[in-house]
Image (cartoon, grey):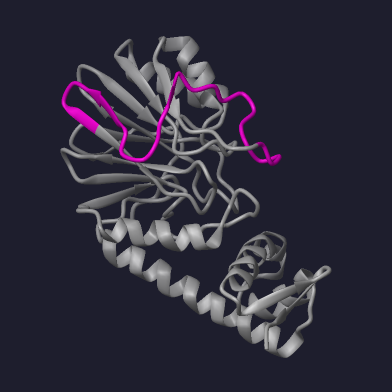
Amino acid sequence: MEKIEPGVAVSIAPRVVRITAPNPGVMTGPGTNSYIIGERELAVIDPGPAIQSHVAALAEAVSGRLRWILCTHTHVDHSPAAAALKHATGAQVAGAVCAQDGRQDEGFVPDRVLGDGDIVSIEGATFRAVHTPGHVCNHLCYLLEEQKLLFTGDHVMQGSTVVITPPNGDMQDYFDSLDKLLKLDLGALAPGHGRVITTPHDEVRRLVAHRLKREQKVVDALARKGPGTLDELVTLAYDDVAERLHPVARRSLHAHLIKLVADGRAEEIGERWKLRK
């Protein structure tokens, strides 16, 4: 099994190179993947965190050929290096913005705001933006049309599930965005964290099944504990997750509960949640 090493340039497909930032952790796995695509003209997808050594590695790799810096979203492990890389290369920055919730890159200023279906091109490569809200409202995947390779940011991550944090994260949006991928002609997924996924639709179906299973565990927790607080319910709904991760799991639990309320299956009373009779 491939071991991902930060700072090492790895070819993952024709004219596609991955350089992983040195920011490994519980939320980032081996680190944030930055992708360099093209030959005579280049684009970078997800420049990553503003770590000097990572920006320098990207700047050296693109060597005056960079035209576009595309960001899947503005969480602080994905977009902050865009400003420094733009300063070093003169490339334009593209992506989408959303309301500040304390987790967004405050310095992200795109030269071009992208929406669903918008196209960015360089010589030999066409990128189609696919709006995939759920993890966060401004999330975009990028489909490299010539290779049917989808750069998924944090919408699909290899080896891990995605955290959904309200209010900018929305569980129903996440389900809808996963369903959207099932309708695309895809050859592989290049995630923001982890290795390339060569069975894209199978992986998306696995994620849908996982989320539905977790939703049922939330319903079961409400049946046992409701009315219950988020802190009370997380110990039941996420009893298969290490306790040290419960503060993170609590955020996705909140998103599941909001969806259950919208579905008419639960209700919120003060800071407690219960099944709707």
**In the rendering, at what x and y percent does residue 139 appear?**
47, 43
| Residue drawn at 56 percent across, 22 percent down | 52
* Quadrant in which residue 170 is drawn: bottom right
Q: Relative to the observer, which residue lies in front, 259 or 141?
A: 259
**In the rendering, at what x and y percent does residue 227 appear?**
79, 81
Q: Is residue 160 visible from the viewing direction of this image?
A: no
| Vertical relation: 55 (above or below) 11 | above
Question: Is residue 214 found left or right of 101 in the rendered image?
Answer: left
| Residue drawn at 51 percent across, 54 percent down | 134
What span is in magenta? 100-126
Q: State which quarter of the image contains the C terminus.
A: bottom right
Q: State which quarter of the image contains the N terminus.
A: bottom left
* Quadrant in which residue 130 is drawn: top left
Q: Is residue 208 visible from the viewing direction of this image?
A: yes
Instruction: Residue 132: say if magenta.
Output: no
Instruction: Residue 122: say if magenta.
Output: yes
Question: Is residue 185 found left or right of 231 in the rendered image?
Answer: left
**In the rendering, at what x and y percent does residue 160 appear?**
48, 60
Q: Relative to the observer, which residue lies in front, 69 or 59?
A: 69
| Residue drawn at 69 percent across, 81 percent down | 236
| Vertical relation: 109 (above or below) 266 | above
Question: Is residue 233 found left or right of 77 in the rendered image?
Answer: right
Image label count:
0
| Residue drawn at 17 percent across, 42 percent down | 147
**In the rendering, at what x and y percent does residue 88 appear?**
46, 11
| Main SS, magenta residues | loop
